[in-house]
Image (tube, rainbow, N blue to C red):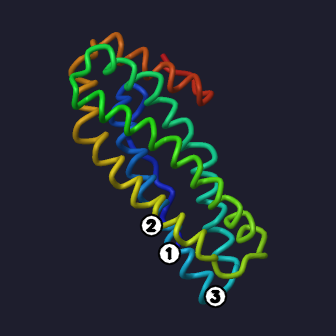
Amino acid sequence: MLPSDDRSTAGFDQPFALLRSCHARMERMDALLLRLIEHVHTNGADAQAQQAATTILRYFDRAAPLHHEDEERHVFPLLRQQADEDEAAWLDRLEADHRALAALWTILRVWLQLVQGGQAQSADAQTTEAAAHFSAMHAEHITLENTRIFPAAQARMRAAQIAAMGQDMAARRGVRWPTG
């Protein structure tokens, strides 16, 4: 049931590659969440379910908020400065998505903590619906960022801005970078 917790080879010197890599992990965590709902319905909150819940909680409690902050600190403001009408609408939507995803996460988190503690029963309708919406929203959100937003931002950033973005991302994660 559990995917490997592989790490991308992208580093803080390539912040957009790192953001895309985070998107891939996010999609894997969404898929794991949906499988977990089925697993708990069939098998209860067994050891495998508890491990999966721990993995999902760790990712969406730690990595995902940092990822959203990366976008809101470095990508969205830069694009807003020179956004055309379409880009401005996309940015409004993405910022609203971040808020909606956070609200859905609060619903999902409660059930996942019960699973983690071995106490959960099958997910109720609200949790199942929230998980489906959470996953679908991420899929659309990620597609827009990967195909439109990141390329537009990257094209407008100078090398020094990209380096500063990577340094800030590393610092907020407690990573010394550059290491040299």
Q: Residue at x 39, y 38 (%)?
A: 94
Left/right placement of residue 96 relative to residue 41 reads left
Upstream in sequence: badge 1 or badge 3: 1
Q: From mark 2 to mark 1, how far is it between C-alphas? A: 6 Å
For this rendering, which residue is in front, 58 or 33?
A: 33
Residue 38 vertical placement versus 34 (above, below): below
Badge 2 marks a residue whose secondary structure is helix
Total label count?
A: 3
- Asked if labels 3 and 1 touch by Cβ distance under 8 angstroms, the answer is no
Q: Residue at x 26, y 21 (%)?
A: 83
Give residue 31's mark: 2
Give residue 43's mark: 3
Q: From mark 1 to mark 3, how far is it between C-alphas? A: 12 Å
Residue 28 vertical placement versus 65 (above, below): below
Badge 1 marks a residue whose secondary structure is helix
**Rendering coords of residue 52 (x, y %):** 61, 68
